[in-house]
Image (tube, rainbow, N blue to C red):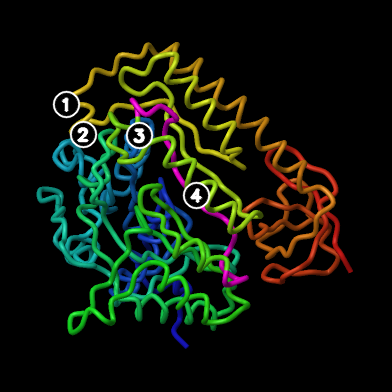
Amino acid sequence: MSDIRPIKDDRRPKVYIETYGCQMNVNDSEVILSILQDSGYALTEDIEEASVILANTCSIRDNAEQRIWGRIEQFRLQKNRRENVIIGIVGCMAERLKDKLLDSRTVDIVAGPDSYRSLPELIRNVTPETPQMNVLLSQEETYADITPVRMDKNGVSAYITIMRGCNNVCSYCVVPYTRGTERSRDPETIVREAAELFDNGYREVSLLGQNVDSYLWKDPVTADRNVNFAQLLEMVARISPELRVRFSTSHPKDISDEVIYTMAMYDNICRHIHLPVQSGSNAMLEKMRRKYTAEWYLGRVRKIRSVMPDCGLTTDIIAGFCGETEQDHRDTLALMEEAAFDAAFMFQYSERPGTLAARKYPDDVPPEVKTARLNEIIALQNRLSRESNEKDLGKTFKVLIEGVSKRNSDELFGRTSSNKVCVFPAAGHNIGDYVTVEAVSCTSATLIAKLIQ
């Protein structure tokens, strides 16, 4: 059995890793740790003892980058106290702002998302006069042969990256510029990684991609052995009925009936789809280059719920995109009502330099209007979330225990198949156990449950 946990060895030099942004960055940090462990490093959670400090960064919104600039100032204090410490910025922000980061005179290493294999060499070559940079994007799957070193605390849930990059080039998004074009990973390596996690006690895997529905492995010998996303889901689900399978993120234009029916066939494929809509206005969707209409989106919602009435549905929504009118905003609120989302990630539009929107469309919705519209979206979603949870009162759910409640050490928490968080009495159960619970009360964010004996 492969060792997939961090090595504890005080004789090794220490690396400290901070991770920002999406689930893919979490998994990328685990890939980075695997590469550095193989080169003689050990992970530390104490920045003061690290000889290498890495920040794995996100560029999806401006405030994410501003947080990193703030952290670079804190890293500068480390360099002032310990002149030999090496500071590295990796990930999407490294790809986007490489020269500016090196100009800060605090950062020693800049490495993009496809450059992590070179980190040991970059570290070796750093001197005070020669910072190191590698930000070349790849056309191939980059890390399929690397077993990530799992940095999570619970040992129950893990991420598996199944593809990298994105071909959609939505007008507001930097991902195609920071992560490159789509490339899918060999399904056999994905299944092997998932099986290895299960053998190490993990009971849930989340398959990750910028757009998982466009996953397509093309067999180099014959097209008869090509594997699409629905087929990959089935391959992972068949490892064991005790292994839960989740995935993110889906694209409304690509999620197929085959995926929906495959989910319905296997109880261990979780009944939850994160389906970002971004706007309910067709004018905004066209300007965003989303390649679907509100009507198409709602048609996909109806299909999902006709096949899986218990399927959880969550989304992303942008308030105040370029040229958004009050009617456009009202269209978004109307779509939210009809779709009845269980939860949503909701943001004000943040112009990203270099994107099509930044080049073509003025960011012309006043900040106070963006804020007011976002607050209205949040208030509506809070109501929808509470109504969704209230419908679950009195129902029973199989829950995978993921941890101890932050509010009460005598309680545990886990998620239902539909991705709703449940809190319930511990009663001698342990993290990693499956339990059956009944929802007895709720907030807009959580189901409060009792154990069913």
- Alpha carbon separation for disc pair 1 and 3: 16 Å
Front position in the image: 265 or 7:
265
Q: Residue at x 85, y 56 (%)?
A: 450
The amino acid at mark 4 is: His
Q: CA distance from mark 4 to mark 1?
A: 29 Å
Q: Earlier in the sequence, mark 3 or mark 4?
A: 3
Per the rendering, the mark at residue 355 is 2
Locate residue 114, reporting x and y percent: 22, 59
Which numbered circle lies on residue 274? 4
What percent of the width, then of the height, locates residue 422? 73, 53
Residue 108 seen in the current view: yes
Marks 2,1: beta carbons within 8 A? yes
Q: Earlier in the sequence, mark 1 or mark 3?
A: 3
Left or right: where does residue 89 sit relative to residue 379? Answer: left
Q: Nearer the viewer, mark 2 or mark 3?
A: 2
Name above or below for residue 216 compared with residue 255.
Answer: below
- x, y percentage for residue 78? 35, 44
Residue displayed at 35% across by 24% down: 321
Which segment is the magenta one?
Answer: 265-284
Which residue does the numbered mark 3 point to in the structure image? 61
Comparing labels 1 and 3, the label whose residue is closer to the camera: 1
| Residue 119 x %, y % | 22, 63
> Is label 4 in a helix, a strand or a loop?
strand
SS for callout 1: helix
Q: Quadrant of residue 437?
A: bottom right
Image quadrant where residue 399 sits: bottom right
Magenta region includes residue 437: no
Q: Whole-Å distance between the Cαs marked 4 and 2? A: 24 Å
Compute the Cα span from label 2 to label 3: 12 Å
Between circles 4 and 2, the one closer to the viewer is 4
Mark 3 vs mark 4, CA separation in Å: 19 Å
Q: Residue furthest bottom?
A: 1
